[in-house]
Image (spheres, rainbow, N blue to C red):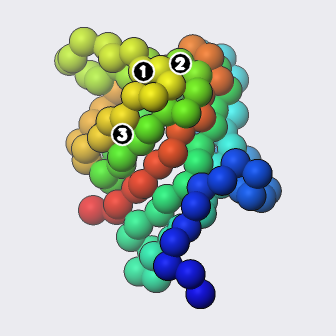
């Protein structure tokens, strides 16, 4: 077993298809594809690739998440803070307690590492 995991686009496999809960959707009909490539045995850390079509929905983070956008345009609207526009190449952390709206302007694909707190 190798201790190196590459996130190669041609080896992602079949994604899980999901959507935000209907009561959280603010605009559009966003659909998500998730290729979870790593889950630690304690189920407290996940890493992979996520993609969403256009739309906007309320989010309420209880987890810690590191992201790098690979493509697309999204805007994060944190309650009480100025909106932040994110594009391909941007990296960021969303900390537990973040509440607001995730808006996908153009289909967005990101790398993620999530740590459950």
User: Looking at the image, is 71 positioned above or below residue 13?
Assistant: above
User: Looking at the image, is 85 positioned above or below residue 11?
Assistant: above
Contact between marks 3 and 1 (CB within 8 A): the answer is: no
**Measured Cα–Cα span from mark 2 to mark 1:** 6 Å
State the mark number for residue 60.
3
Q: Is residue 50 left or right of residue 31?
A: left
Q: Is residue 71 left or right of residue 114?
A: right
Tell me if residue 58 can be seen.
no
Q: Earlier in the sequence, mark 2 or mark 3?
A: 3
Residue at image position (36%, 39%) is: 60
Q: Secondary structure at mark 1?
A: strand
**Measured Cα–Cα span from mark 2 to mark 3:** 20 Å
Give the total of numbered labels. Answer: 3
- Residue that mark 1 sits on: 86
**Measured Cα–Cα span from mark 3 to mark 1:** 19 Å
Residue at image position (27%, 62%) is: 117
Mark 3, Cα crowd under 10 Å, few <14 / some 14-19 / many 20+, is few
Mark 2, Cα crowd under 10 Å, few <14 / some 14-19 / many 20+, is some
- Residue 3 in the image, given as x and y percentages of width and height: 50, 79
- Residue that mark 2 sits on: 73
């Amino acid at each position: 077993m190798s201790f190196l995991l590459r996130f190669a686009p041609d080896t992602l496999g079949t994604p899980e298809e999901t959507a935000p809960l209907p009561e959280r959707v603010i605009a559009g009909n966003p659909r998500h594809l998730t290729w979870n490539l790593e889950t630690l045995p304690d189920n407290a850390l996940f890493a992979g690739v996520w993609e969403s079509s256009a739309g906007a929905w309320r989010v309420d983070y209880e987890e810690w998440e590191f992201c790098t956008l690979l493509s697309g345009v999204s805007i994060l609207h944190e309650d009480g803070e100025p909106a932040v526009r994110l594009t391909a190449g941007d990296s960021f952390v969303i900390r537990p307690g973040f509440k607001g709206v995730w808006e996908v302007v153009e289909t967005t694909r990101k790398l993620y590492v999530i740590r459950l707190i």
